[in-house]
Image (spheres, rainbow, N blue to C red):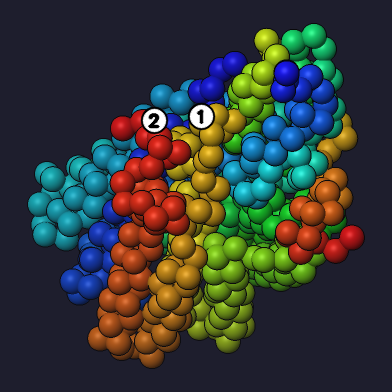
Amino acid sequence: MSTEVSLNRDLVLDALHDVIDPELGYNIVDLGLIYEVEVGTGIVEITMTMTTPGCPAQDYIMSGVYERCKSLPGVDDARVHLTFLPAWSPRLMTPVAKAHFGIQE
Amino acid sequence: MAVLSNRLSRWTLPMFTCALVNFLAAQGLILAGLTWPAESISTSGTLAAVHLLVIGWLLLLVLGALFQFVPVITSRPLVSQSMALVTLIALETGMVGMVGGFFSIGAGYPTLAMALPLGGLAVCLGVLIACWNIGVPLIRSRPLPLPGRMILTGLAFLILTVTLGFSFALTLAVPVLAPYLAPLLAGVGDHALAGLGGWFTLTAMGVSYKLLPMFMLAPEERGIAGDSVHILGTVGFALAVGAGLARVWSAAGPLRTAELVGYAAVAIAVVLYLWDVAKIYRTRKRTVVEAHNRAAIAAFAFLGLGSALAIGFLMTGHLSVGAPAIVFLIVFGWLGGLGLTQLYKIVPFLTWLSRYGSSLGRGHVPRVQDLVLERRSYPWFALYFLGVLVGALFGLLGSPRGFRACIALVTLATVGLVIEYWRAWRGHYAHLRHGESATPPFLPTQRG
């Protein structure tokens, strides 16, 4: 009986909950930093942003996304793209993250 | 994928370390009785303490922060990381030379007094290299946001300040030049205004315009208020300093008027800035204000208090009486206070980047806030600002003993904060939070 789960978008997003923005101290998925996830055969492509352009932690966060994706079963390579269009704002947070930071809807 | 970030300024933390040592050394000079605010600016102890504070402490602190911060606002790297080390060495050795030179002049050793202009030359060199290192990414950045424009303006005032300072050093230490340059010594107040106002204050305002919204999730766009602060501040300091220096050679009435217009413009800029800072706090999305920004409110209050006192003494014609206490409030309360509070965020952030950043995505890593225990910092911040406030009062009342007692409190608070920075750097609280005494596996030490 096989227990393998096929690679899909939800699985990748779930894994990326382990990557935090170190300053805000919260996972990048609920912060709304992940704009797109595309899953191909053995390849994951992530389009993401930062809370502010030139963020000193940018390279580490992107590297963290890459490493976490690469650690998933069935992933041979991961490509992480950075965009600031649209610019991030707290509006992009999930309700859970907004509640954590006390942000009114 | 490359893990090593080039966004980390390698020499920022060493610069902060040297800056804090110099700050404590300056406090030591005051505690030893070598100077206090009512003392004449021309005594060797006062000159040594003042330059330990403004070059050794504030200049190293601000340049160290800018080496990390300018790439953030421009998304461009510094021209050279290694030149940041050259700046550190030039400023530290130059400052030590200047302090030695001041004491040599005071002790009557003219030969050793040459350490003053030589040290001043090293400081000028360090500053010019830093201006090049920071200025190039700023100039090449299009469009340059308000914080960057304010920093560029600040750098121009910094060059003016060190140029004036170097000419003073030549006047004091090289007798053959004294007849030509001596009149400039009357502009020592303008030298201080260019440095504390045009350079440090405008730069601190610019940096705060980026960092406050960034850390509190407030709107970054400052609109007309921010532009007005920049323009009024620039024009105001330029008028006040320029007309003040021109008055060294000419007593023309319009120069005095221009100087007063300059002071008025600066006062309006400060009021607008404080109003705008309050707006940032009010419009923040992040409900909880972290310790560094809570404590920074006191520093902003000291900017307002120092400026109000300056205007008050100016209007009553007694600015020279209040000037030492006002300078003390600005150096210790506003600039020093803002520096100490922001270090409480910057040190853990840089620690996280250099020690834990590479482990992100590979396992559990602490948050930046896990590296500090905020409740430990509040008593030190409170003691520091209380010591500065009461110290300024004793300065105004003419009580050196009371003033030194307050500096002792300030020193105690500074040492307390330094210990907290050190604990953040060592990962002390992150270890405690996970109930382990040794470095846990999720906190790898990648350097050192």
Q: Secondary structure at mark 1?
A: helix
Residue drawn where x is 57% and y is 78% of the image: B305
Cβ–Cβ below 8 Å for labels 2 and 1? yes
Report the residue at 50% width, 62% height from top.
B341
Question: Where's residue B277, x and y in %?
Answer: 71, 65
The percent coordinates of residue B363 (x first, y second) are 54, 34
Quarter where residue B188 is shown: bottom left
Q: Is residue A17 above or below residue A26?
A: above
Residue B446 bears which disc, if any? Answer: 2
The percent coordinates of residue B233 (x first, y second) are 68, 58
User: On the image, numbered disc 1 is attached to which residue?
Assistant: B358
Figure quadrant of residue B162: top left
Which quadrant of the rendered structure holds the N terminus of chain B? top right
Horizontal side of residue B175 vs B427, given as left or right = left
Residue at horizontal 86 percent and vertical 50 percent from the top? A91
- Is residue B336 in view from this perspective? yes
Q: Amino acid at mark 2?
A: Gln
Quadrant position of the C terminus of chain B in the picture: top left
Left or right, residue B244 beside residue B121:
right
Q: Sort mark 2 into few (<14), some (14-19) or many (20+) by Cα contacts within 10 Å.
A: few
Q: Nearer the viewer, residue B36 or B110?
A: B36
Residue B346 position (above or below residue B71):
below
Relative height, residue B237 to residue B84 (above, below): below
Q: Earlier in the sequence, mark 2 or mark 1?
A: 1
